[in-house]
Image (cartoon, rainbow, N blue to C red):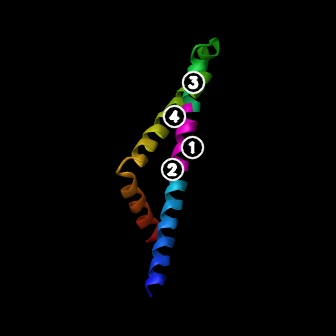
Amino acid sequence: MDKETKETVLQAVDYTNTEAQRYHKRVRLCNGIALLLVLIYSLVKDTDLYNNPTVMIGMDILQGIAVGMLLIGLLFSSRYGAKVRAFKHRLISE
């Protein structure tokens, strides 16, 4: 019985570690995309292409998306991230 309990606990720990790794990989991916969008915005803003009103609106939207992704990444990587995920799971499961 003790051996079975130990195996169950080890499986639970492995699952938790795997889940945490997947979660952190997603946060890093979102932060990387946000960084890329900010870089594109910075490069285009200093060119004559930014004087076009359509390009200006598109770049401003990209900047807003990038800032939003960074704020969401900050929220999820803080101590409140687990609470948000638990709330989301409760909403989905009901």
Q: What separation in Å lies between label 4 and label 3 (alpha carbons)?
A: 10 Å
Q: Of helix, strand and loop, which one carries label 4?
A: helix
Q: Amino acid at mark 3?
A: Tyr
> In which quadrant is the C terminus drawn?
bottom left
Q: CA distance from mark 2 to mark 1?
A: 9 Å
Amino acid beneath label 1 = Leu
Amino acid carrying mark 4 in the image: Ala
- Local SS, label 1: helix
* Tags 4 and 3 touching, CB below 8 Å: yes
Q: Disc 4 marks which residue?
A: 66
Label 2 to label 3: alpha-carbon separation: 26 Å
Label 2 vs 1, first from the N-terminus:
2
Circle 2 residue: 24
Q: Earlier in the sequence, mark 2 or mark 3?
A: 2
Where residue 75 appears, as percent x and y from the top left, is: 40, 45
Q: Amino acid at mark 2?
A: His
Q: Answer with mark 4 or mark 2, whichever residue precedes in sequence.
A: 2
Q: Find disc 3 in the rendering and name its residue.
A: 41
Cα distance in 3D space between marks 1 and 3: 18 Å
